[in-house]
Amino acid sequence: MSKPSWGTTIAGLDIGTTKTCTVVATSTPEGLDIIGVGEAPSTGLRKGVITDLEETVRAIEAATEKAERMAGVHISHVYVGVTGAHMQGTNNRGVVAISGEDREVARSDVRRVVEASKLIDIGADRQIVHALPRQFAVDGHDGISDPVGMSGSRLEVDTHIITGGNTFITNVLKCVHRAGLEPAGIVFEPLASSAATLLAEEKHVGVVLLDIGGGTTDIAVYSGGGAIHTSTIPVGGNILTNDIALGLKTTFAEAESIKKTYASATPDAHGESEFPVKSMDGKTTRRVTRAQLHAIAAPRILEIFRLARGQIAEGLPRDILLAEIVLTGGGSQLRGIDQAAAEFFALPTRIGVPAMIGGLTDAVRKPEYATAVGLVLFGPKGEGAIWNGRSRSVFGKIASWWGEMWN
């Protein structure tokens, strides 16, 4: 699929557990520029799964209206991010004979071998969302990034395949349609976040992206330039907020404010200093030390890291070497979380912010916007599931989704 022509408007929709965000970009000779951003609170999702259709529709409408006003354009199509424990990644290999009398690899051969790699048993209740080629081999010679034009008789591909639950994806599409929008495609959210925050060099040497959202933590591992593992754990920043609310006997809203202002993933130098905490009814306050707060926050952060490490260890070959951890998402803004991750994983760690785009960069250069910005970067490349424009009903068969596998 070709790159967007100059002046084309592209929109991404990140329907999160905590907030819904719409980002609008326009293509320029230099790349993409952000021209509009809108967000609204989300109350209709839990751990990345829609629990209230109407609340989700209202959040989409509010976020999109704000983005349209800022950008001065009307949004009709959006690339939609999806996440949740129902999303699963696996690796597979496809093999085909090279067609043509001259035995030269053509684009059609590439498409055929990628399609061959998608022949896996996923069950009737699931669909393939992405089939991402990692490397090709021609007559046994591997490590090839683009085999087109090479001569040989056998073409192979190693592909990372991501599947999702039909029911969960259909519910997302229902909300998008009810909000008056058409899905241009769906994208597994850690792939979008990776597009906005990771460098090509990092993807080559080996990097783990942890996108810590409100209800989930998305994981994407890259090595040799391609994705080799993706998954989601149903734990995010909201569970830490809930722990603080329970531990300090206060409201969720007050706990969220305390988390952002005082909490730290590492021991605080001002541990004995105190801060006020409102009671449940808001009529009284009491004093709590930062050391007490750290005792609540640190175990939960380590639990998220342990769950992520377990997923990664289960999904990666033993010979894969990793060089770095990148944290993004709203949960990565917790003070000291990068230091805590570096100590836990014994790897250099940084906070990932959107950096691969121009325009209103000050408005979106924060970890919580990584997915939304990444949707406008990743979606148009044609690496995701694309909506078949001939079928406009979300009640149609899930087979109306198809994958364009080659850029």
Image (cartoon, rainbow, N blue to C red):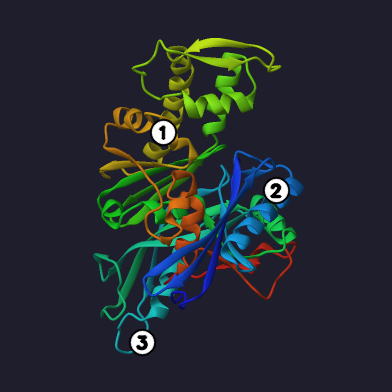
Which residue is the site of mark 3? 100
Q: Amino acid at mark 3?
A: Gly
Displayed quadrant of residue 185: bottom right
| Closest to the observer, 402 or 394 | 394
Which residue is the site of mark 2? 56
Give SS at disc 3. Answer: loop
403 left or right, relative to 294: right
| Name of the residue lying farthest toward the bottom | 101
14 left or right, relative to 313: right
Q: Amino acid at mark 1?
A: Gly
Q: Amino acid at mark 2?
A: Thr
| Name of the residue lying farthest toward the left | 141
| Closest to the observer, 189 or 121 | 189
Query: Which residue is at a point 36% across and 81% down the rendered structure image?
Result: 106
Q: Mark 1 to mark 2: distance in Å?
A: 32 Å
Q: Is residue 216 above or below residue 284?
A: below
Image disc number at residue 310: 1
Nearer the observer: mark 1 or 3; the answer is 1
Displayed quadrant of residue 116: bottom left
Total residue callouts = 3
Nearer the observer: mark 1 or 2; the answer is 2
Q: Mark 3 to mark 2: distance in Å?
A: 51 Å
| Residue 383 in view, yes or no | yes
Q: Is residue 215 above or below residue 35?
A: above
Give SS at disc 1. Answer: helix
**What percent of the width, then of the height, locates residue 277?**
57, 16
**What percent of the width, then of the height, locates residue 266?**
36, 22
Q: Is residue 285 above or below residue 107?
A: above
Image disc number at residue 133: none
